[in-house]
Amino acid sequence: MARGGKRTGAGRPRGAATKRTREIADKASSEGLTPLEVMLTAMREHAKQKDWDAAASIAKDAAPYMHAKLASVQHSGPKGGPIQTVDLTNVSDDQLAALEAIFGPLAGSGDDDAGDPGGEGKESR
């Protein structure tokens, strides 16, 4: 019978606060002024005085508490292969209209080709 060794899912998750850490954080926030509130107040004061370098430095320190970092994701097609694309350059206007009628609602109202009737990245003026 095997004993010991690493068990999947065992232990406290990485980054999870311990009971003591959580108690300290709860007490600090119940007393009113938290480190994040101090950083935000200092950032706002520097911004009022147009000291943008200091405000940006403080904002950089406060940002992880306000905005989660996005996880990097590698996009791929089926079974890790390339993403399949379809060339629509030789499709007739009627076929494009039919595709837009089907898939248009899925795209939402992004209106990403407004002002670009050719769809080639150059605005008409």
Image (spheres, rainbow, N blue to C red):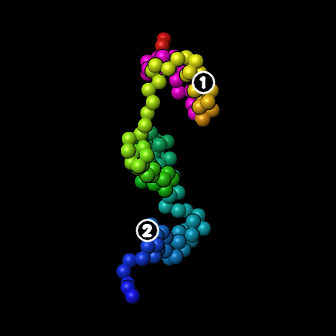
The crowding category of the residue bearing disc 2, from other C-alpha atoms within 10 Å (few below 14, some 14 to 19, many at least 20), is few
Circle 2 SS class: loop
Confirm whether residue 42 shows in the render.
no
Residue type indicated by callout 2: Arg
- In this rendering, the answer to whether 84 lies above or below 125 is below
Residue type indicated by callout 1: Ala
User: Residue at the location (59% across, 21% down)?
Assistant: 97
Confirm whether residue 124 shows in the render.
yes
User: Residue at the location (42% across, 53% down)?
Assistant: 61
- In this rendering, the answer to whether 13 lies above or below 59 is below
Magenta stretch contains residue 116: yes
Of the two numbered discs 1 and 2 on the same chain, state the one appearing first in sequence. 2
The stretch of residues the image draws in magenta is 107-123
User: Residue at the location (59% across, 31% down)?
Assistant: 103
Q: Nearer the viewer, residue 40 or 67?
A: 67
Callout count: 2
Badge number at residue 83: none
User: Residue at the location (58% across, 18% down)?
Assistant: 94
Circle 1 SS class: helix
The residue that mark 2 highlights is 14
Q: CA distance from mark 1 to mark 2?
A: 50 Å
Q: Nearer the viewer, residue 98 or 75?
A: 98
Q: Quadrant of residue 76?
A: top left
The residue that mark 1 highlights is 98
